[in-house]
């Protein structure tokens, strides 16, 4: 079994030709959220992946095995619900509204300019249809935003947070917030800001 313990976000630092030549490993969203998992690459090799806790693997990332082998991650097609504005009366604002309501439920959402994608959920599908959106079941790669429910983009690099690090008193909530966020971001729970 090939041991993998390093991840290069989007192949950062690698010559593109090296990433292109690498064997691939196709993983769905459920697996890509885990920091420890077994997989098989495109050449049939068994992989044991042990990444830092809180790491989220994205399509296009490159895994590096202990022997230096490079493995390009492909986001596997999986069942998703594609949400689009109603063709007759819909607008882009309808997608904004849908994203807001889904975000309030802490649902992982893939945001695109012309559609949203979520994992299948018949209750949410009904809610969205009631909002006059078109909801279609599809097989597609799923790359949700990393915001509220995961560690940024899921990688151990700076996430560009621009909130104050003193935190202290939050007048909107009338309570003290924790002082230490440990900005390595290993948490997988909703971020307290804005909820």
Image: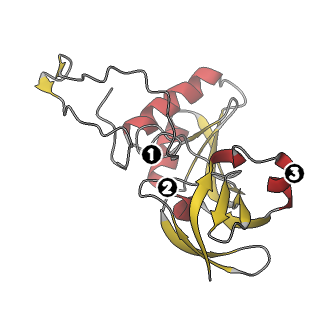
How busy is the neighbourhood of tag 1: few (under 14 within 10 Å), some, or many (20 plus)?
some
Query: Which sits in the foreground, 106 or 37?
Result: 37
Provide residue 128's location: percent of width, then percent of height: 52, 40
Mark 2 and mark 1 lie on one chain; the one further toward the N terminus is 1
Residue 17 numbered tag: 3
SS of the residue at dot 1? loop
Provide residue 42's location: percent of width, then percent of height: 78, 73
C-alpha separation, residue under disc 3 versus residue under disc 2: 39 Å
Query: Which sits in the foreground, 111 or 73?
Result: 73
Dot 2 corresponds to which residue? 121
For image coordinates 52% across by 46% down, the residue present is 155
SS of the residue at dot 2? loop
Using the image, determine if residue 72 lies above or below residue 163: below
Residue extending furthest toward the left = 175
C-alpha separation, residue under disc 1 versus residue under disc 3: 36 Å
Of marks 1 and 3, the one in the foreground: 3
Dot 1 corresponds to which residue? 107
How busy is the neighbourhood of tag 2: few (under 14 within 10 Å), some, or many (20 plus)?
few
Q: Is residue 173 left or right of residue 4?
A: left
Using the image, determine if residue 179 lies above or below residue 187: above
For image coordinates 58% across by 29% down, the residue present is 95
**Mark 1 touching mark 3, by CB under 8 A?**
no
Q: Is residue 156 left or right of residue 61?
A: left
């Amino acid at each position: 079994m090939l041991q993998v313990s390093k991840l290069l976000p989007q192949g950062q630092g690698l010559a593109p030709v090296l990433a292109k030549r690498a064997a691939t490993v196709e993983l769905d969203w459920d697996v890509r959220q885990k920091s420890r998992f077994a997989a098989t690459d495109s050449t049939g090799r068994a992989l044991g992946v042990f990444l830092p806790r809180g790491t989220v693997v994205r399509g296009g990332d490159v895994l590096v095995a202990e022997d230096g082998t490079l493995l390009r991650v492909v986001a596997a097609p999986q069942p998703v619900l594609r949400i689009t504005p109603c063709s007759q009366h819909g607008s882009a604002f309808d997608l904004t509204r849908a994203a807001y309501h889904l975000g309030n439920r802490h649902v992982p959402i893939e945001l695109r300019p012309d559609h949203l994608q979520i994992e299948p959920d018949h209750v949410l599908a009904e809610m969205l249809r009631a909002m006059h959106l078109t909801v279609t079941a599809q097989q597609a790669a799923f790359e949700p935003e990393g915001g509220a429910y995961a560690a940024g983009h899921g990688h151990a690099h700076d996430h560009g947070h621009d909130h104050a690090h003193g935190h202290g008193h939050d007048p909107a909530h009338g309570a003290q917030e924790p002082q230490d966020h440990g900005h390595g971001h290993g948490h997988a729970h909703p971020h307290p800001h804005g909820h």
